[in-house]
Image (spheres, rainbow, N blue to C red):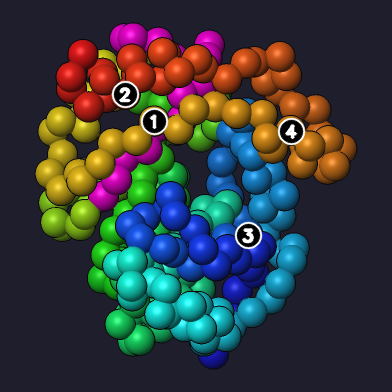
């Protein structure tokens, strides 16, 4: 029985993959994004210690809703790749019951069992934090090398993916970086969707609750026009 640390679950998610999703948020993340809205997931051993079988049994109670909407289960975080053995067990158990599986990750880590994980993954939501390595290090604390390598690996494997990009004024809301990101995405196969995630301040209270200073205090969310413009660049229409 494989055990792992679960932050929380959401039973009727509608944005992290197709259809209605049962979303499992795992503890742990290798990144320290300046805008992180789930800073309470950073501690690997906080919250619930659960077995993969237990989590999937809970998910199965919502199976009629998932099947009716062509949904399934999404493993998110934090970053699920921070608990690779537990992640593989969750996905394997989900596929045993015929559930559609989605992995939501930044790709910052490359665990030894990556291909075993992907063997049980139908869709990857890959968050490219910043296309420029130096800027990515400043924004997240780590290089983007593993993220970009994962995107290329998924393309080569034939794994379906949605590319996500958080639009942060002063950081990623910049035409040159957006066009370089678009050029990288255009080289990939099996990209079903490209999504802009507008920066928001909804996680600031979590930083404050943890006694941490929020680094982007005063940064305002992008306007709807800026979001539309950035989407156009990444989707190749502008």
- Label disc, if present, on residue 231 of the rendered structure: 2
* Secondary structure at numbered mark 1: strand
Bin the neighbour count of mark 2 within 10 Å (Cα to Cα): few under 14, some 14-19, many 20 and up: many
Q: Is residue 212 magenta?
A: no
Check contact, mark 4 vs mark 3: CB within 8 A.
no
Q: Nearer the viewer, mark 3 or mark 1?
A: 1
Which residue lies under the disc numbered 3?
Answer: 27
Check contact, mark 2 vs mark 1: CB within 8 A.
yes
Bin the neighbour count of mark 4 within 10 Å (Cα to Cα): few under 14, some 14-19, many 20 and up: many
- Label disc, if present, on residue 204 of the rendered structure: 4
Mark 2 to mark 3 CA distance (whole Å):
30 Å
Q: For the point 51% across and 73% down, which residue is it?
A: 86
**Which quarter of the image is occupied by the N terminus?**
bottom right
Check contact, mark 2 vs mark 3: CB within 8 A.
no
Mark 3 to mark 1 CA distance (whole Å):
24 Å
Which residue lies under the disc numbered 1?
Answer: 196
Q: Nearer the viewer, residue 69 or 172?
A: 69
Report the span colored magenta: 161-176
Of the image marks 2 and 1, the number of the one nearer the N terminus: 1
- In the rendered structure, the answer to whether residue 44 lies left or right of residue 178 reads right
Mark 2 to mark 1 CA distance (whole Å):
6 Å
* Secondary structure at numbered mark 3: loop
Q: Position of residue 223 (x, y in %)?
A: 50, 15
Q: Residue furthest bottom?
A: 1
Residue 133 visible to the viewer: no
Mark 4 to mark 2 CA distance (whole Å):
25 Å
Bin the neighbour count of mark 3 within 10 Å (Cα to Cα): few under 14, some 14-19, many 20 and up: many
Of the image marks 4 and 1, the number of the one nearer the N terminus: 1
């Amino acid at each position: 029985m494989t055990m792992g640390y679960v932050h929380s679950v959401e039973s009727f998610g509608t944005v992290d993959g197709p259809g209605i999703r049962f979303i499992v948020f795992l503890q742990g993340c290798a990144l320290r994004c300046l805008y992180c809205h789930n800073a309470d997931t950073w501690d690997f051993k906080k919250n619930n210690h659960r077995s993969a079988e237990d989590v999937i049994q809970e998910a199965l109670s919502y199976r009629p809703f998932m099947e009716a909407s062509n949904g399934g289960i999404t493993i998110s975080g934090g970053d699920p790749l921070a608990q690779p053995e537990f992640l593989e067990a969750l996905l394997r158990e989900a596929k045993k019951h015929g559930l559609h599986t989605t992995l939501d990750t930044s790709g910052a880590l490359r665990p030894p069992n990556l291909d075993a994980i992907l063997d049980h993954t139908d869709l990857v939501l890959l968050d490219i934090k910043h296309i420029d390595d130096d800027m990515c290090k400043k924004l997240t604390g780590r290089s983007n090398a593993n993220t970009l390598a994962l995107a290329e690996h998924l393309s080569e494997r034939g794994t379906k993916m949605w590319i996500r990009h958080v639009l942060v004024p002063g950081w990623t809301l910049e035409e040159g970086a957006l066009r370089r990101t678009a050029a990288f995405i255009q080289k990939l196969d099996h990209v079903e969707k490209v999504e802009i995630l507008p920066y928001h301040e909804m996680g600031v209270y979590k930083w404050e609750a943890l006694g941490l200073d929020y680094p982007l205090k005063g940064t305002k969310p992008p306007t709807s026009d800026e979001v539309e413009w950035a989407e156009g660049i990444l989707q190749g229409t502008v």
